[in-house]
Image (cartoon, rainbow, N blue to C red):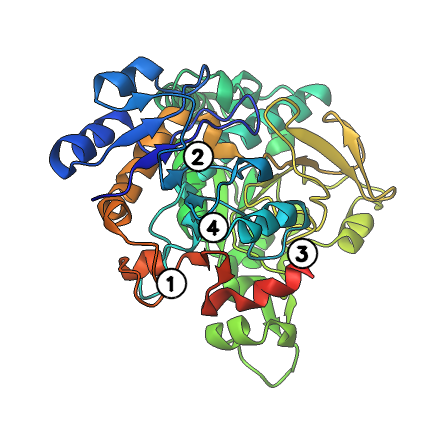
Amino acid sequence: MPNIIGIRREDRNPWERRVPLIPSHIRELIKTRGVKVLIQPSSIRVFADEDFHLEGADVQDSLAPASVILGIKEIPSGFFEEGKTYLFFSHTIKGQPGNMPMLKSLVEHQATLIDYERIVDEKGRRLVFFGRQAGAAGLIDSLWTLGRRLKAEEIDNPFAAVKQTIYYQSLVEAKEEIAEIGMGIRRTGLPPSLVPFITGFLGYGHVSQGAQEIYDLLPYEEIDPLEYEEILRRGDFSPHRVYKVVFREEHLVRPRAASAVFDLQDYYDHPESYEPVLERYLPHMIMLINGVYWAPRYPHFVTKRYLRTLFGAPQPPRLKVIGDISCDVNGAIECTIKDTDPRDPVYVYDPAADAAIPGVLGNGPVVMAVYNLPAEIPLESSVFFSQSLMPFVPALAAADFRGTFEDCELPPPVKKAVILFRGKFTPAYRYMADFLK
């Protein structure tokens, strides 16, 4: 007999309108797989309760009959029930302090935790994700932030017309408006003070690709990082173009040993043997967009120390906005000293005071660090996510979680994502037990 699948309402904040499975996919599970689906009602979800009811799901508050429960964001500790299986973005594998009580509760309830972030293929590539949607929303919000900063500095600019992502009816509407801005730049150009308009992108994965998809609606030209300094020396920039530089690992760090050469696998294995070099590019950029994966063992690519020097110079730097889409607090971008939400999405990082200043004006870059960017385009995000998750749901519904982890028949990508099995850390995640001590 298949497991009953439950879908909980998202309640972390009023902007979280996403759902892990969309109504049409739930219909497929019910009609062709014989899976019973329960879904908690929600007044803010992007799909109405009736949409799920019409497809055959039972809309009810209690998920007690369900043995496998799907969510999106972190789940309150008091929600867990004995022996059940939960799938959501737990944000626990780095020992994030705020989520350790939740992890402890899962252990105490002898629950099974499967983290979407860890569902990967044989090459370690994520299979269930919101990366492109985070990138798209993050770039729109970054352009909106730039427009506000420039307007506050009394600089006329076309980006003042950009809205925050949540105020567009759809991603299509946002793209249409930014494409129109791009046509305006082609026709009339940018103000002289914004030329050259250079944006740096850290990373080349799904997040960066989503951000570049939006940026590329503008009349852009790409600069190779290896040619960056030579192009700056020539100074042949057009006011009718924006420029982008995409930085890979080999552009972000160099070996500390003078005789060594960059090796990607060696960098992954021994990041302490490398030092960051991104900062030499920063003085010429107007925006920096961060989309890289970061863990504490890796270097900070933008340091507080460097920003004190940059913004302590007599001449104000060109850098206006840092869009930290990856949003690791004190991470790759060290001046991301807190995350934000759609209600209050930005702050100025003041390097002299090492403090977050409300608003967009101040001696420092404006940091956009919204922690749940895909929620700002909930329809597109939910559809994409459901499509990527759906191939694994029938196996989850059929799995027997009552035996041992070794005997539990799950697709290999999903089995790699099992952090806890009936309250015990699986072999790949035993290190996490130290986080609970």
Residue 2: percent from left, percent from top: 23, 43
User: Is 28 located above or below residue 93 in the figure?
Assistant: above
Work out whether mark 2 precedes mark 1 in sequence or the reverse, and give the earlier one: 1
How far apart marks 2 and 1 lie (CA) works out to 23 Å
Question: Camera-side residue: 253 or 340?
Answer: 340
Q: Which labelled disc corresponds to residue 111?
A: 4
Q: Quadrant of residue 285?
A: top right
Circle 4 or circle 3, nearest the eye: 4
Element type where label 1 sits in the image: loop
Q: What's the residue at 37%, 21% (across, down)? A: 60
How far apart marks 4 and 1 lie (CA) works out to 25 Å
Q: Which residue type carries mark 4?
A: Ala
Instruction: Say whether residue 298 is visible.
Output: no
In this picture, residue 205 sits left or right of residue 334: left
Q: Which residue type carries mark 3?
A: Glu
Work out whether mark 1 precedes mark 3 in sequence or the reverse, and give the earlier one: 1
Q: Which labelled disc corresponds to residue 136?
A: 2
Which residue is disc 3 drawn over?
Answer: 279
Q: Quadrant of residue 214?
A: top left
Element type where label 2 sits in the image: helix
Q: Which residue type carries mark 1?
A: Gly
